[in-house]
Structure formats: C-alpha cells, structure tokens
Image (spheres, coloured by chain):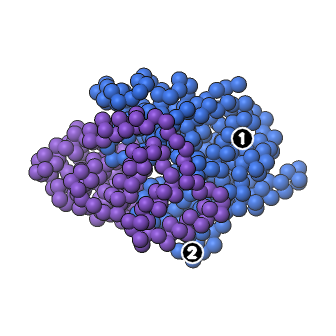
C-alpha cells in the first residue's frame, strides 16, 4: 500500500470527517495515556493525512489507546480518533506486522471466532505462552482470583456458532 | 413484574461473578424479572479493530430479544450503543443484516445503573447507608459515546443514586479517568498507573468505598489493588463495591446474595460502619 492509498484506507475505515481536522489538540489533551505516547493522537491524525504510513504504523501510540472515547466525545469536528486508532491497528495486522499488543488482540479475536465468548483464563494462558515476561503478573492475578472463586474455564457455549463465523467472514475485512 | 432482557457478558462467568450474582439478587428484590438472552456472545470488548465486525458482533446480541436489553458492563453497554448508532446508517445496516440470522430492526439498551435508578425512584430504603462516604467511579464508557445514560462531561446519575441510598457521594476529580483496564495485559505498568491515581484520588476525597459500575474497572480497582500497593509501596485498603452490591446492602440483602466474600478488598469495615450508624439511631 503506497502512502496516498494509506490515507484513503484509514479514511474509508474511520470516516471522511478526518479530513476536516484542525489540529486543535483537544483529543490529545483529553487522553489518559498521552504522557506515555511517542506521537500524540493529534499528531497521529496529521501523519495519516500526510500519508506518512510508516511513521503512523510504527507509532507506539496506537497500542496505548485505552479506547476510553473521551477524544471522540470532545472532537469539535466530529472526528472519532479512536476509530482512527482502530483503523491503524487493523492495517497493522493486515500488513503482517506483529508485536505483543497486536498478539493480544489476535488471541482475543480468535477466541470469539472459535467459541463465541471469552474465557479469561484461556485468554491469559494463551497470551502468557507467547509473552513469557507477562507470566508472573498473570499468575499473581490468577492466584488472587482462584482464591475468590472467580476463575472459570467455561464461559458457556454459544449455539449459533455458524452465525458468529458468518459475521467474521463477512465483516472482518470490511 | 417488569421484564428486562439480560446480557451478562463474558466476565459474568469469571472475574465479574459477584456482579452477576448481586445483579440477579437485586433485580429479584426490586420485582424485576431478568430474562437472559438465549444465546448471547461476546460484544468484542475493545479488541476488535474492524468497526463493521464490532458492530456485527454487538448486533447479534441485540437481535435476540424484543425487550430492552440490560447489561452490567460499561464496555458491553458502550459497544451495544455504538452499534445502534452505526446501524442508523443504511449501508452499515444492510452489510450487517446480510450476515445475521435474525435481522436487526432497532433495539433499546440500558445499563444496570439505569435500571436501578428507575426502580429505586420513590422506593422506601430499608437500610439507609447514613454516614457512609462513597466515591462514585464512572470510569470511561458508562457515558461514552454521548447521548446515552447521562452527560459525558458532567454526569450526576451515580451521585443521585448514592444519595438515594442515604450515603454521601464524595467528589473525586478522577472519577471519569479510564482505569486502564483495556490495555492491562500487554501494558500493565501504564494501566496500573491510572488505577493507582484513581484510588488515591478517591482516598483523598475522604471516601469509605469506591462504587464501581463495570467489571473491568472493578478488576483493576479491587483485584489489582494488592499489586498496586506492592508496586507503589503503600497501604490503600479501599473497598470497591459494585453498584449492585451497595444497592443490595441498602435493600437489606445478605452477604451471600451479594457475593461480598468475592471482593478482594474486604467490604466488612464498610458494613460495620453501616450497622453502627443504624444502632445509633
């Protein structure tokens, strides 16, 4: 995907309003993880509009977004910055780029695809297997939750798995 | 008896069990019949980057009942609401309907907070929570995107609810800061930092307890509190009760009905305070 096509693709996924961004920075100043980001959300949108594909896709900021939607509520242009982040995550995965955050999302989605529901134990286990340094905090958490009877391997069965699969096939790459 | 469709969400089976248990008990006490969606599936939480897919997953749940759909999870609630907003677009609706078993033709969702606020209106509270200071923690998605349960900038629905129970809502400046939960697995440090500040802020405002309305917020504030104390080397011991647990106490339900023993930070000191204040009267 070249740089112009990249801009168009983000806009197709996240909305035409992006073109109207006035770079006011309301999104960045509302962001709860802004202080940890390499590019502020405002700058990320600028990178998208200028077609700076590699800079945008390699930005750590797209993985630090907690999806809290405060930027989306406040944007004076009606842009949904969280949707821009999601579009970038989607393109990242589609292009075969990989990191731990993206791995977590993929495990999460595969569970829905295969079972229809999330089992937090299996999710944590699958993630820890791929990221051994996450094992200790996950185990600590697990012990706390087991003691409280809040760990269950079985989130219940979804009968309509054909429908779930159809939803994935029809809409995942939309 | 009022009938409401109930979408428990994935965490109701595991980390959010006490929320599910207390929700069912409180609904019963309030004369509400919860009818669990027959074949609900995950809403996608915050981990589905394709918007069309996220809308499709949410819509599948919305087509399973003609009743208003109630959920206790703010992430589920926000996702279902976002789906309804996106499905106003005819193109999106057609795409989603082309893969759904039952076609989407509009739906109504509510958060358990809405259900409780409505049901408690004008109702006698058997055990007034006098003398208790509660920090209502909105978190992010209860009010976002806007046009839902309350203003996304200056909400008061939780303060009103706390006041209705006889308790005093205290103002914490970080009551709407995201708990960091959605990124806690790959980004633990970043997430714990937010949670730490939220608990500290509630403590500074003089709260005896935090009231949570989302199972992920609760996990971060309660189950992770030990990890936060260890990391920052301090003693917080801040009980974090689900809104349904707090309402349940005020309705006179027992600890088992409310699964109070499942909370990580013991809510016992809070209960003692409630009973002491009753004894004084």
Tell me the element at label 1.
helix
Label 1 vs label 2: CA separation? 34 Å
Check the rendered structure and report the hue given to chain B: blue
Residue B7 in view of the camera:
yes
Q: Which residue is mark 1?
A: B25
Q: Which shade is chain A?
A: purple
Q: Position of residue B214 (x, y in %)?
A: 56, 48
Q: Residue at x 39, y 68 (%)?
A: A131
Q: Is residue A158 left or right of residue B50?
A: right
Closest to the observer: A153 or B173? A153
The residue where tag 2 is placed is B230
Q: Position of residue A130 (x, y in %)?
A: 38, 65
Chain letter, disc 2 residue: B
- Please rate how many residues cluster around mark 2, counting C-alpha atoms within 10 Å: few if below 14, some from 14 to 19, many from 20: few
Is residue B156 visible in the rendered image? The answer is: no
**Left or right of A19, for residue B110:** right
Residue drawn 33% across and 27% down?
Answer: B98
x, y (%) of residue B80?
46, 36
Left or right: B91 in relation to B192? left
In the image, residue B171 lies at what x, y percent?
60, 53
Side of A134 where B66 appears, left or right: right
Q: Earlier in the sequence, mark 1 or mark 2?
A: 1
Q: Residue furthest bottom?
A: B233
Q: Quadrant of residue A20?
A: top left
């Amino acid at each position: 995907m070249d740089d112009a096509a990249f801009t168009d693709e983000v806009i197709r996924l996240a909305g035409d309003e992006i073109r109207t961004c006035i770079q006011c920075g309301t999104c960045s100043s509302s962001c709860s993880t802004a202080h940890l980001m390499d590019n502020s959300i405002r700058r990320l949108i600028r990178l998208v509009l200028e077609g700076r594909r590699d800079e945008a896709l390699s930005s750590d900021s797209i993985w630090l977004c907690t999806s809290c939607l405060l930027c989306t509520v406040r944007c004076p242009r009606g842009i949904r910055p969280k949707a821009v982040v999601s579009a970038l995550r989607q393109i990242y995965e589609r292009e075969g780029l990989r990191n731990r955050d993206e791995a977590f999302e993929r495990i999460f989605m595969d569970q829905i695809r295969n079972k229809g529901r999330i089992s937090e134990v299996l999710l944590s286990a699958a993630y820890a297997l791929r990221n051994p340094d996450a094992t200790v905090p996950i185990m600590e958490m697990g012990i706390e939750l087991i003691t409280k009877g809040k760990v269950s391997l079985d989130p219940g069965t979804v009968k309509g798995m054909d429908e779930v699969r159809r939803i994935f096939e029809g809409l995942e790459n939309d | 008896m009022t009938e409401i469709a109930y979408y428990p969400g994935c965490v109701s089976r595991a980390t959010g069990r006490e929320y599910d248990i207390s929700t069912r008990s409180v609904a019963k006490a309030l004369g509400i019949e919860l009818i669990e969606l027959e074949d609900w599936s995950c809403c996608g939480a915050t981990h589905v980057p394709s918007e069309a897919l996220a809308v499709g997953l949410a819509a599948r749940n919305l087509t399973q009942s003609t009743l208003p759909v109630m959920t206790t999870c703010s992430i589920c609630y926000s996702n279902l609401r976002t789906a309804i907003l996106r499905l106003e677009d005819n193109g999106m609706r057609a795409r989603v309907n082309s893969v759904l078993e039952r076609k989407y033709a509009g739906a109504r969702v509510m958060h358990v907070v809405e259900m409780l606020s409505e049901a408690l209106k004008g109702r006698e509270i058997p055990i007034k929570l006098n003398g208790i200071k509660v920090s209502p923690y909105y978190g992010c998605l209860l009010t976002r995107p806007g046009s839902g349960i309350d203003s996304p900038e200056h909400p008061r629905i939780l303060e009103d609810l706390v006041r209705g129970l006889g308790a005093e809502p205290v103002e914490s400046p970080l009551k709407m800061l995201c708990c960091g939960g959605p990124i806690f697995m790959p980004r633990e440090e970043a997430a714990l930092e937010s949670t730490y500040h939220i608990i500290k802020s509630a403590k500074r405002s003089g709260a005896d307890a935090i009231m949570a309305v989302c199972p992920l917020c609760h996990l971060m504030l309660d189950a992770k509190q030990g990890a936060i104390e260890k990391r920052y080397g301090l003693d917080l011991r801040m009980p974090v009760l689900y809104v349904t647990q707090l309402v349940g106490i005020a309705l006179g339900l027992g600890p088992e009905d409310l699964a109070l023993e499942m909370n990580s930070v013991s809510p016992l000191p809070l209960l003692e305070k409630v009973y002491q204040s009753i004894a004084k009267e």
